Image (cartoon, rainbow, N blue to C red):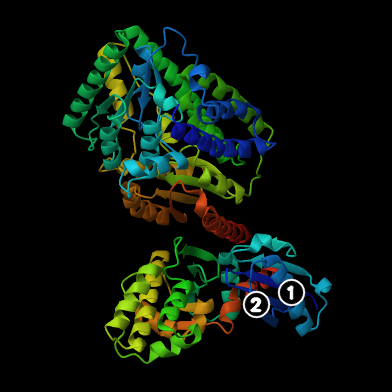
């Protein structure tokens, strides 16, 4: 193992362990959270994801996936294991600095750094990586990744509503299916795909259940905990994750029944919108909870956008299932790389109502232009709905945490005052 | 009579204020923060109590605010600068005021706070993590011109045609000023240009925050008439200055300590 890789592993391990210990320090955390903490620890601290996933001989193929458009159902149906690779590490993004232009976003830099150095090792575990053509940075990242690993580009249409785009997308998924069959040597049969859809359907059902539980008037789980549990899906086998998530949801349901809450009812309810907080960049989820807010929902591509929607196959013919997968992974997706993207505003409006939100924190990762572009529309919508929005522009560097703390704290104070005023009036 | 204290531990200066339960300001005191904010706070508060004639032990409550607020362990409570400044502004302005926007130009940050008719914070914007638009920007450029920070404000007012300073980065602005000096521009025009540049930068923040009504200028920037004039030109509205611009946060914190802030 190269010295650089060793150093990066050590640095990654330290900052990831810091986040996980922070979560473990909360004595009132749900007991069932520990499973997810261990998944993340295996991925980033102990660097032993291969053992944890029990990739025994004959070792199944591992497919690394970026963004949220590649159907993991097809990967499972081919007998392979998907891992989600979008990067959240500050240390890896520093390693990636020399591989990407200065203004590229830290998600891309971190993924490039991790791939080039093979740290954490889960990046090396992948036999192939799938890069959907979403934003410019991800597209160019795909090209650069090809120097280190086999890359499959998945051509995602940027205008969802056209019939041509839908046909092209379906073609693309058929190509993805053929590629998976070639890689694994397994033909994807109707039955296997049906089972994979059902298995991920159970996972998505539990994810939705978690979001529903978080709609309770008294928050039963901290946002930084819920986000970690959802995120762990990226590094776990879907069936195991679903079991653990079922147990977590059962525990939270108990809490709802007994009105148990780590926070109390009068706490401002916030959404973390905009660019994703990817582990171990837990800066904002932690700040929101530490400063007295309840992070009750998100629209993150390692959270809600990743796992919320089910696949709606009516008949179980191969073609019908492929069409259903195509719709699931294109139509409800509200990634700002789509234009027009009015669906996103529609979903945000829905979230304000469902989660009884008091405010929105909007993360702009440095270099991510498209989320910043859509901020204006989101601000306009939230003005209509009477919700304050706090834009926070940052990257994975921990140096600005104290400045951000003041901002987040003042935002929460402001909302609290508004709540009290309304309560008094 | 119950007495409440507010301590605003800023990056450059530490400010303390005492108010009584009738919302009367009893006294204020300022000292450089130094390296140990905790110790400085104790000293400043003791000196202020002596000046006003109350026993430090008899203070009913102490609230800290500002950058080092969490280090001030003699305070029972701490609030963000945003909340403290909003409370201070409400106190300074009185009921009839048309001011709905506060601009605070501090040593290491600047902020814009917009509040509604009841004085509740509606929105705020703070500068990003560099010195552009802060007191440090003025300090650094004053040093290049070899004038004191106190002088630059009145000096700027004498200019007929301010130079254009385009760089927001302190380091680049310094070299821009040096090259203007080398081209024999009048230092008065350069100083005025520095103020205009700073006002422009903060005006962008103010518009982003939803600038409304008239403006109250606080922080060290409030002591600078050149900056006040530059803001009026840039924002096209009246800019008021609090009686104790640098102490606005400390006064606000003292009022919050006594839960006296809301009663306008």
From this view, report whether residue B121 is shown above or below residue A64.
Answer: below
- Residue A411, given in percent of the width and then of the height, sits at 53, 57
- Residue A59, given in percent of the width and then of the height, sits at 42, 11
Instruction: Write down the chain letter for disc 2.
Output: B
User: Along the line of sight, which residue is nearer the eye, B130 or A10?
Assistant: A10
- Residue A67, given in percent of the width and then of the height, sits at 35, 33
- Disc assigned to residue B31: 2
- Disc assigned to residue A240: none
Q: Quadrant of the C terminus of chain A?
A: bottom right
Instruction: Write down the chain letter for disc 1.
Output: B
Question: Mark 2 or mark 1, which is nearer the start of the sequence?
Answer: 2
Disc 1 + disc 2, Cβ < 8 Å: yes
Q: Quadrant of the N terminus of chain A?
A: top left
Q: Secondary structure at mark 1?
A: helix
- Residue A288, given in percent of the width and then of the height, sits at 55, 48
The answer to whether residue A125 is seen in the rendering is yes
Q: Please, which residue is most extreme toward the front here?
A: A3
**Which residue is located at x 51 percent, y 81 percent?**
B222
Residue ID for mark 1 = B43
From this view, report whether residue B188 is shown above or below residue B34.
Answer: below
User: Along the line of sight, which residue is nearer the eye, B154 or A225?
Assistant: B154
Q: Image check: A211 left or right of B132?
A: right
Q: Secondary structure at mark 2?
A: strand
């Amino acid at each position: 193992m190269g010295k650089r890789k060793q150093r990066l592993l050590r640095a990654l391990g330290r900052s990831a362990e810091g986040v996980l210990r922070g979560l473990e320090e909360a004595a009132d955390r749900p007991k069932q959270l520990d499973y997810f903490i261990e998944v993340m620890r295996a991925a980033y601290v102990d660097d032993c994801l291969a053992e944890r996933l029990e990739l025994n001989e004959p070792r199944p193929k591992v497919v690394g996936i970026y963004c949220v458009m590649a159907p993991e159902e097809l990967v499972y149906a081919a007998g392979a294991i998907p891992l989600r690779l979008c990067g959240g590490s500050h240390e890896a993004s520093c390693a990636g600095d020399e591989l990407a232009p200065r203004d590229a976003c830290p998600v891309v830099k971190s993924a490039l750094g991790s791939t080039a150095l093979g740290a954490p090792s889960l990046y090396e575990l992948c036999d192939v990586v799938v890069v959907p053509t979403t934003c410019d940075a991800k597209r160019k990242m795909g090209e650069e990744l090809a120097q280190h690993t086999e890359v499959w580009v998945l051509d995602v249409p940027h205008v969802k509503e056209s019939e041509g785009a839908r046909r092209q997308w379906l073609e693309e998924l058929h190509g993805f299916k053929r590629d998976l069959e070639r890689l694994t040597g397994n033909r994807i049969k109707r039955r296997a795909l049906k089972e994979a859809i059902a298995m991920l359907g159970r996972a998505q059902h539990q994810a939705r259940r978690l979001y529903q539980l978080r709609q309770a008037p008294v928050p039963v789980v901290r946002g930084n905990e819920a986000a970690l549990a959802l995120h762990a899906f990226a590094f776990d086998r879907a069936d195991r994750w679903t079991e653990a998530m079922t147990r977590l949801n059962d525990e939270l349901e108990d809490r709802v029944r007994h009105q148990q809450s780590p926070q109390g009812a009068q706490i401002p309810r916030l959404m973390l919108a905009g660019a994703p907080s990817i582990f171990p960049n837990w800066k904002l989820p932690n700040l929101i909870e530490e400063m007295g807010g309840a992070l009750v929902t998100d629209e993150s591509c390692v959270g809600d956008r990743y796992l919320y929607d089910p696949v709606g196959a009516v008949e179980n013919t191969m073609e019908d299932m492929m069409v259903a997968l195509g719709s699931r992974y294109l139509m409800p997706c509200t990634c700002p790389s789509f234009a027009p993207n009015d669906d996103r505003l529609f979903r945000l409006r829905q979230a304000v109502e469902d989660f009884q939100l008091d405010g929105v924190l909007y993360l702009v990762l440095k270099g991510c232009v498209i989320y910043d572009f859509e901020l204006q529309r989101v601000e306009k919508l939230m003005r209509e709905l009477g919700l304050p929005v706090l834009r926070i522009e940052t990257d994975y560097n921990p140096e600005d945490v104290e400045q951000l703390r003041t901002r987040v704290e003042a935002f929460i104070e402001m909302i609290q005052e508004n709540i009290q005023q309304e309560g008094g009036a | 009579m119950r007495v409440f204290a507010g301590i605003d531990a800023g990056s450059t200066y530490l400010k303390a204020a005492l108010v009584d339960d009738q919302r009367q300001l009893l006294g204020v005191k300022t000292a450089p923060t130094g390296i140990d904010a905790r110790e400085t706070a104790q000293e400043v508060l003791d000196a202020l109590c002596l000046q006003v004639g109350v026993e430090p032990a008899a203070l009913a409550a102490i609230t800290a605010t500002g950058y080092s607020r969490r280090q001030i362990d003699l305070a029972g409570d701490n609030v963000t600068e945003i909340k403290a400044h909003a409370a201070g502004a409400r106190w300074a302005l009185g009921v009839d005021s048309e001011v709905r926007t506060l601009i605070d130009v501090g040593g290491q940050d600047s902020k814009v706070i917009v509040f509604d008719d009841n004085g509740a914070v509606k929105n705020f914007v703070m500068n990003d993590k560099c010195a552009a638009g802060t007191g440090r920007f003025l300090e650094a450029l004053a040093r290049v011109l070899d004038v004191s920070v106190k002088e630059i404000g009145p000096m700027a007012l004498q200019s007929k045609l301010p130079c254009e300073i385009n760089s927001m980065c302190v380091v680049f602005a310094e070299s821009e000023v040096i090259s203007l000096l080398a081209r024999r521009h009048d230092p008065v025009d350069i100083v005025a240009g520095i103020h205009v540049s700073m006002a422009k930068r903060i005006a962008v923040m103010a518009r982003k925050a939803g600038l409304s009504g008239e403006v109250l200028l606080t922080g060290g920037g409030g002591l600078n008439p050149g900056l006040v004039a530059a803001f009026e030109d840039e924002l096209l509205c009246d800019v008021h200055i609090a009686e104790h611009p640098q102490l606005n946060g400390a006064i606000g914190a003292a009022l919050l300590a006594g839960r006296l802030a809301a009663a306008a």
